[in-house]
Image (cartoon, rainbow, N blue to C red):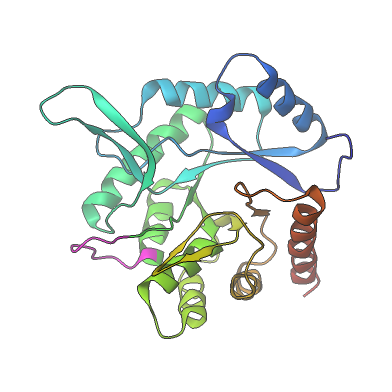
Amino acid sequence: MDRTPPLGFVEVHSENFFADGGAALAVLHAARERYDVSLHGVGLALGSAAGVDPWHLDRLARLAQRVEPARVSDHACFARAPRAGAAAVLHANDLLPIAFTDEALDILSSNVTQVQERLRRTILVENLSAYLSFADDAIAEPQFFAQLCRRTGCGMLLDVNNIMVNALNLGVANPLAHCKTYVDALPLEIVGEIHLAGYCEADDIVIDDHGSRVRPDVWSVYAHALNRFGSVPTLVEWDTDVPALQVLLDEAERASRMLAEAVAA
């Protein structure tokens, strides 16, 4: 914070700042004085048939009032469900994948609409890195997001690394071409932010671990996305095995250069 590096914005996990005071919130306010802030949630569980937790939504609304964020986002996932035989709804504290079906789209759309009405603003919904799929999937993922955005007026937070991780885990013949096809299938107007990150290869699975530099293939998909969507606010995520600040700034600077080139083109 003392260096105040030239960044377009900073992004935080909303849930870390739900308290009404304390050191964390003070740091966030200090950051907000220097930068635009994007609130990125991991707990709304927008795809849950059990609905959105009212307390969680109230705390998010309060936080948004305090910091006046540039963007608010969360994931296309579920995490809330009642325990068998009990009335209480439990939260799995994870980003669990949803099926790409009409029924799941109805649930997600309803919950997104509820959040947007409470916040009095549109939100962005992020595509997931998913390590399983459902037998009844019936809608291609890009079309699923296109329909969600058309129904609710929300935008999409396009995580390029997640697309690549999923392609690698699917074992497609050409992961790079697969990811570019995904990008090309998205409507031009829906992408409001892009995420980049590193991934790791562990035995027979690729994990979106946010613990290393962005891979060359992900940079290639990012360049393709910028060519399609133009200059879109971009975040490099790195929250495990965090390196020296200069390494983080180098990754952010590379993304900034590519954004500038997209504007010039």
Q: Quadrant of residue 14?
A: top right
Vertical placement of residue 145 versus 90, above or below: below
Residue that appears at 59% across and 14% down: 20
Q: Residue furthest right?
A: 3
Outermost bottom residue: 173
Q: Main secondary structure of the magenta part?
A: loop
Q: Position of residue 64 (x, y in %)?
A: 59, 28
Residue nearest the viewer, comparing 210 with 91: 210
- Report which quarter residue 169 is drawn in: bottom left
Question: Residue at (55%, 66%) from the top-left corner?
Answer: 188
In the image: residue 185, left or right of residue 170: right
Taking the image as shown, residue 69 lies to the left or right of residue 18, namely right
Observer-nearest residue: 137 or 212?
212
Q: Which residues are magenta?
A: 132-141
- The answer to whether residue 41 of the structure is visible from this angle is yes
x and y percent of residue 86 in the render?
Answer: 14, 23
Work out whether 88 lies above or below 216: above
